[in-house]
Amino acid sequence: MKPTADTLNQPKIKPLNPNFSSGPCSKRPGYALKNLDIATLGRSHRSAAGKAALLKTCVDTAELLDLPEGYRVGVVPASDTGAMEMAMWSLLGARPVDVFAWESFGQGWITDINKQLKLDAVNAYTADYGQLPDLQKANPKHDVVFTWNGTTSGVKTPNADWISDEREGLTICDATSAVFAMEMPWHKLDVVTFSWQKVLGGEGAHGMLILSPRAVERLENYTPRWPLPKIFRLTKGNKLIEGVFRGETINTPSMLCVADYLDALDWVRSLGGVDGAIAKSRDNLAVIESFVADNDWIDFLAASPETRSNTSVCLVVDAADDQVKAMAKLLDAEGVAYDIGAYRDAPAGLRIWCGATVEASDLDALMPWLSWAYVQATG
């Protein structure tokens, strides 16, 4: 049944933390600037202290994610977008490319591959918001580019069974809203990118680039036909610039952001590691799943439960587009939920972040407010 004005009063309990944005995402519970180790502030990032802090971001990331031996982790410029562009411009062109997209960011990679890199042999497999394309079309002889979790559609890849263990091409995965929140089959992934401001609630402007030995081999044995700007260069003299993966960044990073990220990694440890963070995110999703099951006026954009994201949860509402937007504005004005309107390219709806930095108790408090806002917006 749909709630009515006669039976629904304004809820009395509000979320203690109304930050449900899907990026930048909520800071971790208990976060305080005073807890950051700011010893590197005002120091050169190339000083011993600066390089040690940056190296620690790489080492701690690899350790927490339990990366396979030989995988490298580097801090690169320009968030997840910068990391993905660096990977595509440096690695693509050696083989045909299969690109899979089902929301705006995946479509962006298709655009860059076709219109900027202008590759000749490109197969684009796409699907509408809420759906997945046929991943079985991935050719093991081709390079593959895809997002693990569609941040703007709330649709994730359910597994990596479709990626061949005998593949000849590379798999390049934009996993910015998945790493630290979803199980990642690292042996299936050759390049993985993410950013601090998603799952860990870190600060923006920095990306993380993870390379498998196969990706390093490609870098050292293939030269793209196009010029690479300095900010994208990962090799010198056909050898990997190992410094990038030892804390010697290509450009100047914010040491305050580095301190913030290290704080977030310590918090993940306090949860019991990545498994704890994943479990917390799944418990958060369960709150919304229960609410949706009890209310027939709201549903998930993801068509299949197995593809339902447990971070960027996208919802559709039985209401006109302007009414759905009015709901988001009402919740913002009440200080109940900030920034939960659907992404600008996505169908009208609500998007609620459920990563581990969000508390289930805040989601419990939010759910009655969704019903209230629905009544207010639809009359």
Image (tube, grey):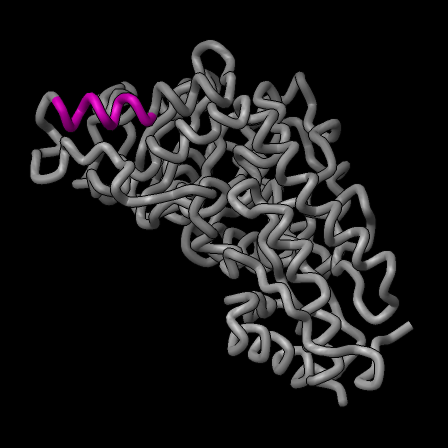
* Quarter of the view holding residue 260: top left
The stretch drawn in magenta includes residue 61 = no
Report the side of 46 relative to 89 (left or right). left
Q: Which residue is at 69% across, 36% downward?
A: 138
Report the side of 201 relative to 307 (left or right). left
- Secondary structure that dominates the magenta span: helix
330 relative to 124, above or below: below
* Quarter of the view holding residue 61: top left
Instruction: Please provide percent x and percent y for residue 285.
Output: 70, 47
Instruction: Please provide percent x and percent y for residue 219.
Output: 37, 25
The boundaries of the magenta stretch are 49-57
The number of discs equals: 0
297 relative to 84, above or below: below
Report the side of 148 relative to 215 (left or right). right
Q: Residue furthest bottom?
A: 379
377 relative to 361, above or below: below
